[in-house]
Image (spheres, grey):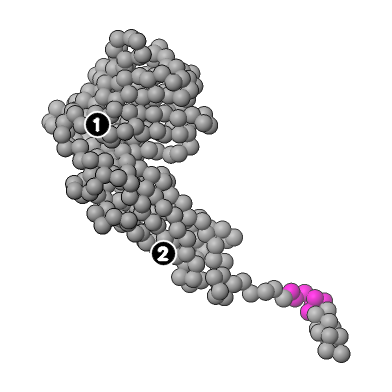
Amino acid sequence: MRKFALLLAALFLVANGCVISPRRTVNGSGGGGSNSEFSLSANPTSQSVSAGAAATFTISVRAVNSFTGTVTLSASSASSSVAASFDNTTITGGSGSAVLTVSTTSTTPSGNVAITVTASDTANNVSQNVSVTTSVQAAASIAGAIVPAGCVNSPAGSGLQRVSLPLTPDAHGFTATFDATPSTSAMDASLGFFSPASGPHPQLSEFIHFSPPGFIQAANGDGLIPSNVPYAAGQTYHFRMTENLPAATYSLFVTPPGATEMPLGTNLQVPGGQRGVMTLAGWGLLVNGPDGATLSVCNFTLR
């Protein structure tokens, strides 16, 4: 008789347009209000930094299942000499991003330091973690030091790879030398510098471009000049760049394998992001494609 009564009650509710749904439970607590689901990511996931400098990472929260709650960010460092801080610790409305700054000191030991980022939805007792790695190199206080000591390999799709270093060139500028090896002869990759900026996202100022048609180009201002200097997969090219900071001009030279040095451009205008800058925050590279392509930069020196 009890079962029959329950069946009649259920039929009555369905007939009147009502549906009984189970209450959502997240981590053992009732999910009243918005669904407590979100994704957490970091870009990039690793960076090299010279001791005494800082590296920045973009931490992103994305809503899942129409999540509209508030997420609080925190970070912990595996090293007492490496500090981590955010420009904003609260993400509202379900989605957003914050800049994580990882700061080192001149005495920070060389090695990889893991930073754990935690995003918490305290209203529903839900949290997620993501880790980033800072590869600390010895302080580059000596002119001509290799920064970093090893190579920086940037695969396509990995985002901007930055090498942070505290560098204040003299009044006339600086000279940079390095070797670059493309994995394919049809890649879309850029190398350049970034400088301290008022905003939270310092961008790479592109000086060198490995173009998909297979040529190495130099930037003149915010554009690229034509080039008849080809590059080939697996070959290493030596670059020398001299920059005149007060004049906002630079000259770029390349030495192909088995050949002599040749100019890619002289007295070119630096990209817009570098004009008027007297301090560099580091250098970086970005590979846009194709899938599977990698650009390797080694023996980077600054004088």
Q: Residue at x 26, y 50 (%)?
A: 103
Cα distance in 3D space between marks 2 and 1: 39 Å
Q: Residue at x 46, y 20 (%)?
A: 233
Left or right relative to 206: residue 4: right
- Where does the N terminus fall, quadrant-wise? bottom right
Looking at the image, is 250 positioned above or below residue 66?
above
Image: magenta residue range: 12-19
Res. 12 visible in picture? no
Residue on which disc 2 sits = 72
Whichever of labels 2 and 1 marks the residue nearer the N terminus, that label is 2
Residue on which disc 1 sits = 146
Res. 235 visible in picture? yes
Looking at the image, is 241 positioned above or below residue 195?
above
Residue 289 screen position, x and y as percent:
49, 30
Residue 210 screen position, x and y as percent:
41, 23
Q: Are there few (<14), some (14-19), or many (20+) residues within 10 Å of tag 1? A: some
Which one is closest to the eye, mark 2 or mark 1?
1
> Which quadrant of the view contains residue 111?
top left
